[in-house]
Each structure stands twice: as structure tokens, then as C-alpha cells.
Image (cartoon, rainbow, N blue to C red):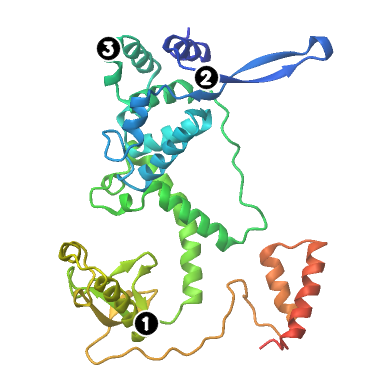
Amino acid sequence: MQTNMETFEKRKAALERLEWNFILEYEYRGKNRDRTKVELELFHAVQLPLSPHDWVRLCRRNSEEYIGGCCGNMSAVQDILNEWFREDGWVNAHELVDLGESMRDHGDEDFKDMSSSELHDFVEEFLSIEDSQKNDVLAWSKLALLYHLIKDHYNPKAPAAQPLTKSEIEGALLMVSRMSWSIGMDDFFKKTSSVQRSPTAESAQKIMRLYRFLPAFKILYDRLYEIAPDPVEGYAIVDLEKGEGEIAENGLGYCIYATQAEADRYLQLIEKGRAQHKDENFKKERKVGIDEFKIRPVRVSIENGIQFMGAGERPKRRERRKYHPHWMTQDIEDADMLFEQYAKNRRLEEPLRGECLFAWREAAKFFSFRGE
């Protein structure tokens, strides 16, 4: 005999007792006059049981339940919450389950797996709360209870592989970008990471996410090794406040430039902007002077990363390399041989293949291509 919250009907009844709104999936069955609407035992959408006070606590920066700054995973969850707020609080069931599983993987106690009896107690605890005390209930606890009630009775989005037209490198870049954002890569490599401590059930989900990430990361590493086999030398801007060996960063990454003139120009722009301000407090609060920085020659390689060059060394002028696309795996003698490698990588099929080959040949004539 099934008890507590083991069946769909009991989950549905619990939502009705809580007076939380939901929509079930349905379909029409029968023919002509006998055709009727039949509700399925699947939750399609739910209205988040959040008050205006709850939304403020969840979405306003510096509020007690705002989680956006914790890690990459929680930043992604915070973005989802803010989007839901703009959509009036109705969400698809699969979206709520996805968010709940992110919270579970992050280690939130309310979202951890529950037995049927534990879920029953969770519901009863909510129902016993007096109206005068409902504003004291954490908004995250409400979301957690709603997640547990629907997560075993919904229709997940069907998974799909990437389109055949997408190249391997494009797919890897997409995967690395998505996974780095959603799991917060920093979490994996901290000394306190549960992944490093032991592969227990608590960290199993994190470990599996890491393993999903690794194949795409390897593809990118191999391709980077192909297109950047030689060290590159240039000039880096060092943040002297942090130390002689600390390279400054801006919105484009590390401040490394091909020539010293480029690095000088960037610092001069900073100094020019600083000169416009007369307020001394501004200059003290913001580090915006050339004297806070230093330009040092560096060598960058895929094996060793960034290395400062020795005293007296200067970056060598870089010779122009002949470009080889990553999909070019064999030497070629003419434009058609090059096209065959490209078409294989892109999985071109007729009639598109024929049109592309015609344009390819015309372009080869225009640029006087001889297979060099």
C-alpha cells in the first residue's frame, strides 16, 4: 500500500491543500462528439507561491535571500529567478526542476533528496504555519517544497545531440562556455572542494558534471595546441599594487600586447582620463595612474602559460605564419582537394554541396589559388 507522498494524486492533493496553483498536461481523446479533454498525471506549469516580500528577498541585491554572488552555478540560478520575476511567476515544470537540481547539486539542504515520509512532514510543517508567521518563512523553502512535490511527475525536455551542421570545435566551445557558467569551475579546484575530499554521494553530481565538461575541454586543448604551437612574445601591464609579477586584467582578459607602443597607449588613455578629474578623493579611491603600473616583456605558451622574460630580453618580432584551419588535416594540391576536407568537416550534402563547390571554385580563381 502506498502512503504519504508516493503517488501523483497525493502530490496533487498536497498542492491543493497548500492552495498553490498549477496546470496539468492534457490531451483530447475520442472522435467527434465523444472527443473529450483528459488531464494527464503530469505537472505542466506552476505558479511560484511567492509574495511581493519574497520576490524582494530573492531578487534585490543585498537582500537576505539573494544568492547571485556565491559562484557561477548560483549566479546562473539568480539570473533564472530574475527572469521568472519578469514573467509574473508562472514557470514550466521542467524549468523549476532544473533549478531545483542545481540547488541540490550545490548542497542546499532543503533541496536534497527526500523520502516520501520526509516530504509528507515537510508539507504538514508548511500547513501548520500561522498566517501571522508566513512572512517569516524563507522563500527558498517554498521553492524547495514545490520542487519536491512536482519533480517525479513532469515531462522533461527531450535531450538532443548538437546539429550535424555544427562543427566539433563549435560544439566544444558551446559546451565549455555553458558548463563553466553553470557549475562554477572555481568550486572544483578549491582546497575545500568536496570533489577533492572524497567521491561520496554528496559530491557525485558535481563529479559527473566535471566529467561532462572534460571531453569538450580536451577538444579545445587539442585545437589550441594545433593553432598555437609556438610561444608568443609581447608586453604585459603589471599591477604594482598587487606585486611585480601580477598581470593586470580588463574586460578583454590579461593586458598583454604585441608591441610596447600598444601597452603605452593604453596606460596613456588611463592617465588622460584621470587628468580630467580634479577631485582628489576620486584619485585615491580609484587606481588610475601610470605610476601604479609597469610594462614587462612576457612569453606566452600553451605549455607554460605566461612567463616573464629575463633582464635585457626583448620580445622578438613575430613572423607571419601561414594560416591552416583546424579542419585541414592533409596537404592539398588544388582547391577541390581543400574543399573536400572542408565539406567533410561540415557534413555538406546535395544540393547544398554542389552550390558550395561552385562558389568555392570561383573564389579560388579570383584569388589565384594554387594550393600553396
Q: Nearer the observer, disc 1 or disc 2?
A: 1
Tell me the crowding category of disc 3: few under 14, some 14 to 19, or many 20 or more residues within 10 angstroms, Cα based.
few
Sequence-first tag of 2 and 3: 2
Per the image, the residue denoted by label 2 is 22
Per the image, the residue denoted by label 3 is 132
Check the image and name the residue furthest to the top: 1
Q: Residue 21, position in %: x, y?
A: 49, 17
Looking at the image, which is closer to me, 130 or 61? 61
Disc 1 and disc 2 in contact, CB within 8 angstroms: no
The type of residue carrying mark 1 is Glu
Q: Residue 175, position in %: x, y?
A: 50, 54
Q: Residue 206, position in %: x, y?
A: 37, 44
Sequence-first tag of 1 and 2: 2
Image quadrant assignment for residue 29 = top right
Sequence-first tag of 3 and 1: 3
Q: CA distance from mark 2 to mark 3?
A: 25 Å
Q: CA distance from mark 3 to mark 1?
A: 64 Å
The type of residue carrying mark 3 is Ser
Looking at the image, which is closer to me, 115 or 72? 72
Per the image, the residue denoted by label 1 is 262
Tell me the crowding category of disc 1: few under 14, some 14 to 19, or many 20 or more residues within 10 angstroms, Cα based.
few
Q: Compared with residue 122, is residue 257 higher up or lower down, i.e. above or below?
A: below
* Residue 45 visible in the snapshot: yes
Image quadrant assignment for residue 283 = bottom left
Q: Compared with residue 243, is residue 366 higher up or lower down, i.e. above or below?
A: below
Helix, strand or loop status at disc 2: strand
The type of residue carrying mark 2 is Phe
Left or right, 110 with respect to 349, comes to left
Q: Quadrant of the C terminus?
A: bottom right
* Residue 112 visible in the snapshot: no
Q: Nearer the observer, disc 2 or disc 3?
A: 3
